[in-house]
Amino acid sequence: MTAWLLMAPLAGAFATGLDPVISRAEQGDASVQHELCYQFLYGEGGRQKNFELAFRWCSAAAAAGQSSSQTLLAEMYYLGLHVEKNEGMAKEYYLVAAEQGHPHAQLMLGRLALHNSDVVDPYQFCYWTRAAAARNYGKAIEQLQSVEDQWRKQQKPGAAGYCDSVMAKQSHTQASQPAPTDAGEVSRTSCPLEVDRNGCGRRPNNSFKPKPLRGSA
């Protein structure tokens, strides 16, 4: 009995401050911070779901430049996990991760372009979803195929595909505008990734509104 009482405080200390993984994360190891971010968010690695701790470690790893943690942090803002739902913050973190080439962040930027109740943005949808598909991301490939199938059902045989049409119109729009006098005048969101430099800027005038896949975010 006495031995158990003496060991109990040690067991509690090990479960908290002496956890070697958490100790490494607290020392600034970004890869371990991301590991904890994922584990606490989804209840993996023998840890229970804890959105507060997930937010803490996702934030730390995201600040260190971990694109996967930036994507998970965006998800927390998008779904309102531990924080209030904030689509603006979600988009910011998705964008930072997408610019680093994270395919799920790219996919989500494309999906959010479809879900915007004020302005559906075909160019952003095609740009980012194609970027993710170019990385062989299955969900992006499936999403593009779904939209193209919807589009072709409404077009005459031989018509250009949906995203090809969107990109062509965007290129025409950009070509008709005067070039900036300084490279600094081009916003970071106009050409955010070296995937498809067919044009950047505002969406073309297009009444077709593609439907996202069932169950997509």
Image (tube, grey):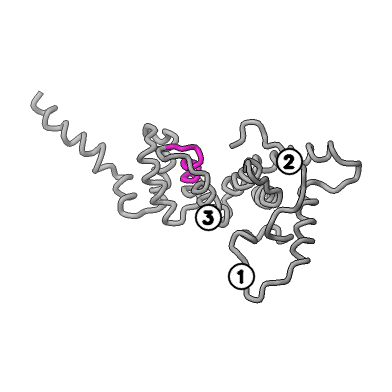
Instruction: Point out the residue furthest to the right here.
Output: 157
Query: Quick one: label 1 or label 2, which is nearer the N terminus?
Result: 1
Q: Going 70% across and 52% down the picture, which residue do you hit?
A: 123
Relative side of 211 to 169, left or right: left
Disc 1: which residue? 185
Report the residue at 57% width, 51% height from top: 102
> x, y (%) of residue 119?
66, 46
Q: Which mark is residue 96?
A: 3
Amino acid bearing label 2: Lys
Quarter that holds the C terminus: top right
Question: What residue lies at 71% left-to-right and 48% top-to-bottom?
Answer: 122
Q: Which residues are magenta?
A: 72-81
Secondary structure, mark 2, is: loop
Residue 145 left/right relative to 72:
right
Q: Which mark is residue 111?
A: none
Tell me residue 142's x, y (percent): 70, 39
Choose mark 3 or mark 1, whichever is in front.
1
User: Where is 6 relative to 30, above or below?
Assistant: above
Q: Label 2, on which residue?
A: 209
**Label 3 sits on what residue type?**
Val
Q: CA distance from mark 1 to mark 2?
A: 31 Å
For the point 39% across and 33% down, which residue is it? Answer: 49
